[in-house]
Amino acid sequence: MKILILSGGKGTRLWPLSRENFPKQFIRLFSKHSLFQETVKRAKKLAKDEDIVVITGEKYEWIIRSELEEIDANEVRVVVEPEGRNTAPAIALGVKYLIHSETPPSETVLVLPSDHLIKDTEKFVEAVKKGEKYAKEGYIVLFGEKPTYPETGYGYIRLNGKLEEGVYEIEKFEEKPDYEKAKEYVSDGKHFWNCGIFLFTLDRIVKDYTQLMPEIPFHEKWEDFIKDFKNFEEISFDYAILERTKKLAVVKMDAGWSDVGSWKAVYDNLPKDEKRNVLIGDVKAMDTECSLLLSQGKNLIACIGLEDFVVVGTEDATLIVKRDYSQKVKEIVKELEEENDERAIEHVTSFTPFGSITKLDRGERYKIRKVVVKKDKEIPLRMHHHRTVHFVVLKGTAKVKVGDKEEFVHENESFFVPKSTPYKIINVGKIPLEMIEVQSGEYLGEDDVETLE
């Protein structure tokens, strides 16, 4: 079995914890690992590391590689989309990669979202193995959960004839329903939640793409396919393939699945105290019940007299919303985007190929940041024309080249970079290199960062 893991997203529904540059698959709320890492760990129960392929965007590549390294999954393949085109082109890219890697046409391929919660891994693996039998018989197999409440944020699958216990043919797909229709789907016994997990053989899916999206040229060389990717229709796999093809089956998963696509869903899937509250981080609750209070950062969150609320605080933003209104969070994010507010896009901490950068303060002519360079990584040769930069080493050892001068800089030591002077920083120590960076000058835009190698 080959496994494709889709890791894109916009990071709007769990704002402010998720952002466009840090979507929800990288959030750690349900275990010490992120949702992405938990997805990879589940995939490893079904396939070898080298048979797992992550499809992601350029802005997430270094987060992905760092997270894979953390769980000792360095042999997992990472394929970067030339641009985001929705799930149909993303899956097609993964399929083309498998063809390019000389995967046999009869091989089964499992497609997983990277941002879902599955509580029971054993039942998930059991369902996939049951579904593999039908994939080999020519079905596209989906996976569903029996709905336990009227969720309006999920798609539903209407069941047809039973193929065996827990496996059904699919009659039709239902769009996200209104509340009354969702109540009907819960009670009629004929619907499953659509978990967005797909299983098929390579030759079956190539035939579907060839018939339904003939503009996708699987016959091309890999390099030409990548060049043509920008021309593929921006459309979901559900609309492009599933709703237009035949011979579909669904396997009942019963594995504690949730797409955790809202703060209400997060609340539903976390343990509660005696007042049905979820309290995470530096929070205080008085006369408060059935609420989620989460502080990620230095600020204390104190609440009095709340019921059915979500309060989420980060270093730079705080969300306060009634739990049942949490699907509207993306509307707030849309407003922030329209106002060009960077808090819709970036966290205070951003990830880079060499480590991370945390914003500490900014004024009209200065920026102060904490820079972390991972072991054996470096900040490549660069230069600024409109700012000077002063670095203070907090922890670790740096090998620094500023102009023609090269030196080692240790803890509690500093170095200075004048304007229009090339510099490079290498972590030569055994631990992460941590520094405070102070930029000062008449212009501090990112286009004044000239990379020289």
Image: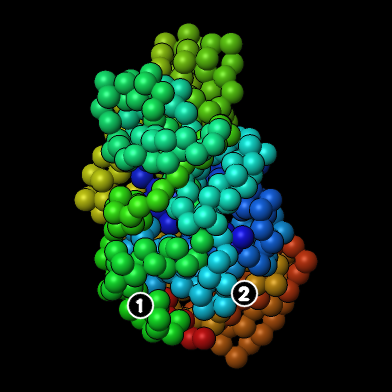
Q: Position of residue 117 (x, y in %)?
A: 54, 39
Q: Residue at x 59, y 16 (%)?
A: 273
Residue indicated by mark 1: 217
Q: Residue at x 59, y 41 (%)?
A: 127
Q: How many numbered discs sit on the rendered protein?
A: 2
Mark 1 in CB contact with mark 2 (< 8 angstroms): no
Q: Closer to the camera, 210 or 410?
A: 210
Looking at the rendered structure, the secondary structure element under dot 1 is loop
- Please give the label number shown on residue 76: none
Q: Is residue 321 visible?
A: no
The amino acid beneath tag 2 is Glu
Q: Earlier in the sequence, mark 1 or mark 2?
A: 1
Residue indicated by mark 2: 378
Q: Is residue 446 left or right of residue 315?
A: left
Q: Closer to the camera, 173 or 450?
A: 173
Q: Position of residue 99 (x, y in %)?
A: 51, 75
Residue 27 vertical placement versus 329 (above, below): below
Q: Residue at x 61, y 57 (%)?
A: 67
